Image (cartoon, rainbow, N blue to C red):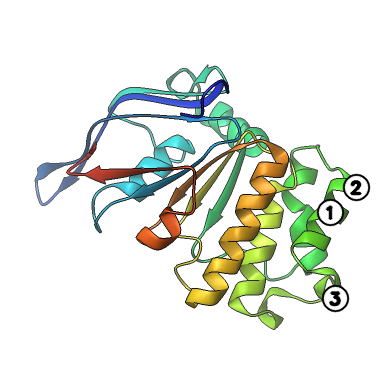
Amino acid sequence: MASGNRPVLTVTGLKKSYRSAGEDIAVLRGVNLAVAAGESVALTGESGSGKSTLLHLIAGLDAADVGEIILDGVSLSELGDAGRAALRRDRLGLVFQQFNLIPSLTVADNLTFQSRIARRHDPKWQEELVERLGLARLLKRYPEQLSGGQQQRVAIGRALAPKPLLLLADEPTGNLDEDTADEVLALARDLVARTGCGFLLVTHSARLAATLDRQINLHAGVIA
């Protein structure tokens, strides 16, 4: 964890199993990790190691069997569905491989969607995001009119518009070619540093992982 910075995320003893074909399959077997404000951490691991499951638990999209997730001093296990949804809305930025933009909204409206829901829309920060992400000429377009790299830039801008406490990204460059992936991740790192939020990136790419502050590996359900 980044020295001197407060932890924005602490995960302790996290376990998660799923029922399949009549038996329990352990996916996470006691995960411990922490991410500090302003720190970027890459989470790597082979396919099926539980990386996406871990991110979904941190985002409050699923509940752990055992263990604790503390985000901004709040334990997710103490929150109901509504509380987790509010925390996700107000304190988390989420970026996924499939972009998940709203097809009926323009780029401009997609960018402001999250910050307006969270009631933290900042026009000056929005202008900076548009400029830094190179989206000024695309604001009136719709997602279907954009390349994959452009869509992912919009997704990153939408996630960072409310200035979240923590940005979670699950293979955000998985659908992009290598050069575009490098460019998109560099923009994300710069903007994360600008906001001072924590950044947890799931990636299968050792090359991309090496560009972040710290790398951790998930193997057989635990942090190796």
Residue linked to disc 3: 137
Cα distance between the residues tagged 3 and 2: 18 Å
What secondary structure is found at the residue carrying circle 1?
helix
Q: Are marks 1 and 3 in contact (CB under 8 Å)?
A: no
Q: Is residue 147 above or below residue 218?
A: below
Q: Are marks 1 and 2 in contact (CB under 8 Å)?
A: yes
Q: Is residue 187 above or below residue 35?
A: below
Q: Residue at x 51, y 66 (%)?
A: 98
Q: Quadrant of the C terminus?
A: top left
Q: Is residue 19 left or right of residue 110?
A: left
Can residue 155 be seen in this snapshot? yes
The tally of labels here is 3
What secondary structure is found at the residue carrying circle 3?
helix
The crowd level at tag 3 (other Cα within 10 Å; few <14, some 14-19, many 20+) is few
Q: Is residue 157 left or right of residue 36?
A: right
Q: Nearer the viewer, residue 203 or 206?
A: 206
Residue linked to disc 2: 124
The crowd level at tag 2 (other Cα within 10 Å; few <14, some 14-19, many 20+) is few
Q: Amino acid at mark 3?
A: Arg
Q: Amino acid at mark 1?
A: Glu
Q: Which of labels 1 and 3 is toward the front?
A: 1
Q: Position of residue 85 (x, y in %)?
A: 58, 35
What secondary structure is found at the residue carrying circle 2?
helix
Q: Position of residue 26 (x, y in %)?
A: 17, 40
Q: Are marks 3 and 2 in contact (CB under 8 Å)?
A: no
Quadrant in which residue 197 is drawn: top right
Q: Residue at x 51, y 51 (%)?
A: 169
Residue linked to disc 1: 128
Disc on the earlier residue, 1 or 3: 1
Cα distance between the residues tagged 1 and 2: 6 Å
Disc on the earlier residue, 3 or 2: 2
